[in-house]
Image (tube, rainbow, N blue to C red):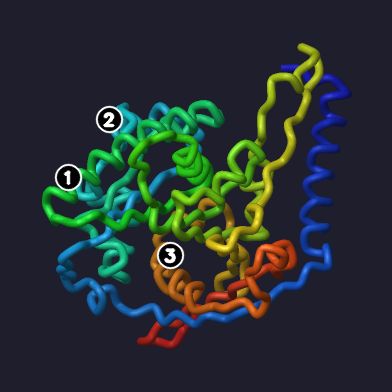
C-alpha cells in the first residue's frame, strides 16, 4: 500500500497534536488534590471465605473494544451478544479471573454468585454501542425480575466497565421505559469520553458514578469520534477528533486519576487482576474522600482534579509489588 506525502504529514500532525494535548493537560493550572492510599496485598485465602448475603448485589462487567471482535465474541460468548454468568467461563479464562479476584478481595461488594459479564461485538462503532445498550437493558431487566422472584427484593445493580464498555453503559440512559432501571453504581475504567455520550453520565438512572483514568493511557484519548461528514475526499485522510479523559462535572460523579506504586497505568492494565484486586479499596477510599470545595451547582466547574496514588505492600515479605 502506497502512502501519499500529504498522508504522512497528516499522521505526523496527528501525533504532534496528541503530544501537545498531553503536555497541556498537565500544565493547565487546574488545582490537583493528591491523596495516598496504602493497600496491603494479603493472601487471597484470608479474603476468600464464602460470603452469604440475604440480598447480594448484582455486578455486571462490560468489556471494551476488541481488536479481533468476532473471535473474542465467538470464544467467550458463543457468538451471541448478551449476559453470561461468571461461573460459565472456563477456570483459566481471564474474565473469570476478574470475577474471582473481586470476590476474593471484597466478597460482600462483588459476590461471585451474582457476577455477570456482558458480551457485545466490541466493534469501534458508536451505533453498535448504542444497539448493544438496548440488549444490555433487556438483559438487566430479565435478571432483575429473576432476582426479585428469588430474593423477594429489588436488586442493587452495579456496572463495571472498561474502555468503550463505558459508552455502552451510558447509552442505557437513552432508553425510554415507564419503569426504568436504577444503576446504583457505575464504575468506569479508562472510558474514552466522547461528545455523543458524555452528558448521559448526568442521568438520574445512575445513582453514583466513579470515573478512573490514567495520564499514561494513550488509547483512551486517541479513540476516534467518527463523523461521516468529515470525509469530504476519497483520497485524503480526515482524522476525527480526539476523545477526552474527564466528563462534565456532576454532584454524583467522582473522577480520579490513578497511579499505582508511582506509575500511571496503561489502558489494558485497568482490566487485569493486579489492578482489579485494588479496586474495592480504591472505591472505599473515594467514598471517604471529601473534596474541600463544595459541590453546589455554581461551584461545580471549579472542582479540582483528584489524584490517587496507590501503594501496595505484601504483608509477608514487605516488598513493594
Say which label, 1 or 2, has the lower sequence index.
2
Q: Tell me: 146 left or right of 198.
A: left
Pair 1/2: label in front:
1
**Residue designated by label 1:** 146
**Residue designated by label 3:** 274
**Residue designated by label 2:** 78
Residue 60 in the image: above or below residue 264: above
Say which label, 3 or 2, has the lower sequence index.
2
Q: Are marks 3 and 2 in contact (CB under 8 Å)?
A: no
- Local SS, label 3: helix
Q: Tell me: 87 left or right of 247.
A: left
Q: Tell me: 255 left or right of 116.
A: right
Residue 57's label in the rendered image is none
Q: Position of residue 309 (x, y in %)?
A: 59, 75
What distance separates the C-alpha of mark 3 from that of mark 2?
A: 27 Å
Q: Quadrant of the N terminus?
A: top right
| Residue shown at the point (53%, 26%) measured from the top left | 127
Q: Residue furthest front?
A: 178
Pick the front one: 68 or 308: 308
Report crowding for label 1: few under 14, some 14 to 19, many 20 or more residues within 10 A (C-alpha).
few
Report crowding for label 3: few under 14, some 14 to 19, many 20 or more residues within 10 A (C-alpha).
some
Amino acid at each position: 500500500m502506497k502512502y501519499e506525502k500529504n498522508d504522512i504529514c497528516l499522521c505526523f500532525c496527528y501525533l504532534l497534536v496528541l503530544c501537545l494535548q498531553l503536555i497541556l493537560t498537565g500544565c493547565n493550572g487546574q488545582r490537583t488534590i493528591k491523596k495516598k492510599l496504602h493497600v496491603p496485598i494479603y493472601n487471597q485465602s484470608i479474603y476468600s471465605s464464602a460470603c452469604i448475603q440475604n440480598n447480594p448485589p448484582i455486578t455486571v462487567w462490560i468489556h471494551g473494544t476488541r481488536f479481533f471482535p468476532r473471535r473474542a465474541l465467538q470464544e467467550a460468548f458463543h457468538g451471541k451478544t448478551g449476559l453470561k454468568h461468571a461461573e460459565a467461563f472456563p477456570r483459566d479464562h481471564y474474565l473469570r479471573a476478574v470475577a474471582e479476584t473481586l470476590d476474593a478481595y471484597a466478597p460482600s461488594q462483588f459476590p461471585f454468585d451474582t457476577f455477570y459479564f456482558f458480551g457485545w461485538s466490541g466493534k469501534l462503532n458508536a451505533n453498535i454501542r448504542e444497539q448493544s445498550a438496548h440488549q444490555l437493558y433487556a438483559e438487566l431487566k430479565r435478571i432483575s425480575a429473576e432476582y426479585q422472584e428469588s430474593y423477594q427484593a429489588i436488586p442493587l445493580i452495579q456496572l463495571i466497565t472498561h474502555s468503550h464498555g463505558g459508552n455502552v453503559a451510558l447509552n442505557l440512559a437513552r432508553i425510554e421505559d415507564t419503569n426504568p432501571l436504577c444503576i446504583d453504581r457505575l464504575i468506569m475504567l479508562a472510558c474514552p469520553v466522547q461528545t455523543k455520550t458524555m452528558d448521559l453520565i448526568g442521568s438520574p438512572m445512575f445513582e453514583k458514578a466513579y470515573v478512573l483514568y490514567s495520564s499514561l493511557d494513550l488509547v483512551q484519548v486517541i479513540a476516534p469520534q467518527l463523523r461521516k461528514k468529515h470525509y469530504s475526499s476519497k483520497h485524503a485522510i480526515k482524522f476525527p477528533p480526539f476523545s477526552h479523559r474527564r466528563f462534565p462535572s456532576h454532584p454524583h460523579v467522582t473522577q480520579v486519576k490513578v497511579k499505582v506504586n508511582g506509575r500511571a497505568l496503561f489502558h489494558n492494565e485497568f482490566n487485569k487482576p493486579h489492578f482489579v484486586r485494588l479496586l474495592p479499596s480504591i472505591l472505599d477510599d473515594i467514598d471517604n474522600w471529601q473534596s474541600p470545595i463544595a459541590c453546589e451547582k455554581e461551584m461545580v466547574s471549579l472542582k479540582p482534579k483528584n489524584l490517587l496514588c496507590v501503594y501496595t505492600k505484601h504483608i509477608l515479605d514487605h516488598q513493594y509489588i
